[in-house]
Amino acid sequence: MASVSRSSLRSTSSSADYDAIVIGSGIGGLVTATQLAAKGASVLVLERYLIPGGSAGYFERPLAGNSKGSGYRFDVGASMIFGFGDRGTTNLLTRALAAVDMAIETVPDLVQIHYHLPDGLELKVHKDYEKFLHELSDRFPHEEKGIRRFYDECWKVFNCLNVMDLLSLEELGYLTRVFFQHPLACLGLVKYLPQNAGDIARRFIRDPELLKFIDMECYCWSVVPADKTPMINAGMVFSDRHYGGINYPKGGVGQIAQKLVEGLEKAGSHIQYKAKVTEILTENGRAIGVKLATGEIYRAKRIISNATRWDTFDKLLPENRKPNSEKKWQQRYQQSPSFLSLHLGVKAEALPIGTECHHILLEDWENMEAEQGTVFVSIPTLLDPSLAPDGYHIIHAFTPSWMSDWQNLSPSEYEQKKEAAAGRVIDRLEKLFPTLNQHLDYEEVGTPRTHRRYLGRANGTYGPIPSRKLPGLLGMPFNRTAIANLYCVGDSTFPGQGLNAVAFSGFACAHRVAVDLGL
């Protein structure tokens, strides 16, 4: 009776129940929520699923044939994590947790990626910067100077970012303060803001194969080649991997969201699961609350959507309420592909001695952006063995795939297609792990339909990508929207995809909202 009464009051009350409501508990949404809670705001996070994290969530499965024993703890997404460094200002995950008195033990990974590329291009990206440059220059000795000049240029971008607090570029007080504190760094960022990584690379490098490698360096996290990847983002990724490094959270990537939720609740705010938002409510052109699938209504002074911009403006708001700015944004940006994902449990013998945690496999440069072209591989149990039973490992392999390729199938056709696609990926993986098939213990296949169903993302998309070449990050929207009191956060906002990037978006959004609330 109490919950019914509370729901009824919320539905009829004109006052706000909360300072802010966050739709979705992806990392961007949780960083926003925890930052606001740490500032004293009352925040409610509404999550449609059973656990937090979205693409940074987890799921558990038993060891085949031994369901009573310990099983596998799979990451939903990739396990190559930036943002857990212990110095500078770009360690945003460390800082987000610290804001609510939380911390996670991490395991350093001394090799970011082991590339397996066409024409026998085998290369490891070591945390040691000089070791990486030396290995790359050994393959392209005639480009040694150009290689150093390009990656040193990335460091210039990173060094500009790494001296300032990364907050909202929409807030004049912050911009004024940071400019007077770090004028040269600010001017440096203004210089790089309209540029793409490919434009910079082609100033210093001529070798076509090396330029393709740099395309892959960008594609593996931005899902576009270098000429569409903003230089600001490239500078962050290509330098932080040697500065803060890649650090895997003990217990799995899902621990990040779990700890943020724990900190959120310790700070006096709340998260509600199985709470599917179906509508953002507006009044006199201002966002005032949300409606759930159950019919329950919550009101807040500010509404923050961690859904994609397509879901936010095409599904949660009436079509006639979509601002012209969003229509223009959707002309500049399109949905990236989703993924075909294989979550495998394998016996330890499947992995050759010396296997690294992260791999990228591509046999033909022409297929880099193609459906199921590039294969990404994570083996997090090499860093944290507790995620699988003794003597076993987890392999998460995923490759780009479009929703359109999985539509209009009967249940049996869908299962057959999944099985066939998984078989093709495993055949390719056996180039790296020759005995994989014979040591396979568990297999689960996800498609774009799976990503859409469990993550609530339009077509299961990984996020927005430029529909054409754009001037760096200048086309990427910030957190405020054209609808008063409605904000967006996550990979559909500046600066884009990746856990550390959406954490940046969360810091910026929380700062902007806090200023607007007068906190």
Image: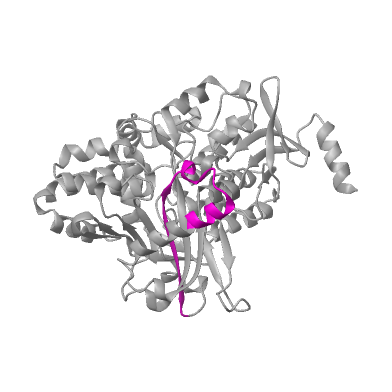
Displayed quadrant of residue 40: top right
Note whether 362 is above or below 234 in the view shown: below
Quick one: 510 or 380, which is closer to the camera?
A: 380
Specify the quadrant that holds the C terminus.
top right
Note whether 381 is above or below 368 in the view shown: below
| Whole-percent x, y for residue 240 in the image | 35, 52
Note whether 472 is above or below 123 in the view shown: above
| Whole-percent x, y for residue 376 in the image | 38, 56
Q: Seen from this angle, which residue lies furthest right?
A: 1
Note whether 115 is above or below 339 in the view shown: below
Q: Locate residue 137 relative to residue 92 in the image: left or right.
A: left
Q: Is residue 79 visible?
A: no
Image point (66%, 21%), residue name: 285
Q: Is residue 8 visible?
A: yes
Q: Say if the magenta span includes residue 414.
A: yes
Displayed quadrant of residue 302: top right
| Whole-percent x, y for residue 237 in the image | 35, 48
The segment highlighted magenta reads 391-418
Numbered label tally: 0
Q: Say if the magenta span includes residue 423.
A: no
